[in-house]
Image: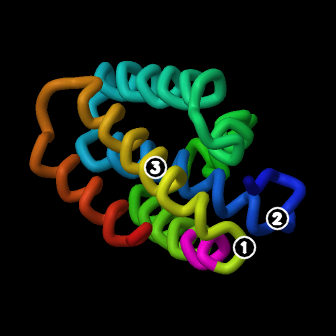
Amino acid sequence: MAKKSDFTEQEWESLQKGVLGAGLLVSLSDRSFFDSFKEAGALAKHVAAAKQSNTSELVRELADVRGTGFGLTSSPDKVEHETVEALQSAKATLEAKAPDELEPYRQFVVDVAQSVADAARGGESAESGAIERVRSAIG
């Protein structure tokens, strides 16, 4: 079972940025002021639940995150580009160092994105497109 100490700082940052970026990407795909609060809450709640109860030790450690890796003024294009890049890097890292953790990580990322999409009504097509980009990036 892999854990944080098995990865470089840069690899770990990519793993975390991929998770949180997936949620942000979905949220930014259909921006609405009030929906953003619901979606941020859903993201935080999902990550907190994973920290407490996910069966993967790696996912539990990844859920112990202190920031998103994005600034408050990050553009949607920047969030998308950096999230896709982080997810592709995370996939390659896990394939090389912890292949048994790739599926739990992939599921965590997709579940976070879906939780954000489900948090508020409206924008389903834009959010579905964002989730599809996340799925494609993580394989």
- Please give the residue where the numbered disc 3 appears in the rendered image: 109
C-alpha span from label 1 to label 3: 18 Å
Q: Of the two numbered discs 1 and 3 on the same chain, state the one appearing first in sequence.
A: 1
User: Which residues are drawn in magenta?
Assistant: 91-95
Question: Residue at (82%, 64%) from the top-left corner?
Answer: 7
- Please give the residue where the numbered disc 1 appears in the rendered image: 97
Q: Amino acid at mark 2?
A: Phe
- Residue 7 badge: 2
x and y, in percent, of residue 51 in the image? 65, 28
For label 3, the crowd category at 10 Å Cα-Cα, with few meaning under 14, some 14 to 19 and many 20 or more, is: many
Q: Are marks 2 and 1 in contact (CB under 8 Å)?
A: yes
x and y, in percent, of residue 56 in the image? 62, 42
C-alpha span from label 2 to label 3: 18 Å
Q: Is residue 86 magenta?
A: no
Question: Residue at (82%, 52%) from the top-left corner?
Answer: 4
x and y, in percent, of residue 55 in the image? 59, 36
Question: Residue at (32%, 70%) from the top-left corner?
Answer: 136
Q: Quadrant of residue 113?
A: top left
- Front residue of 34 and 99: 99
Q: Is residue 93 magenta?
A: yes
Q: Amino acid at mark 1?
A: Lys
In this rendering, the label closer to the viewer, 1 or 3: 1
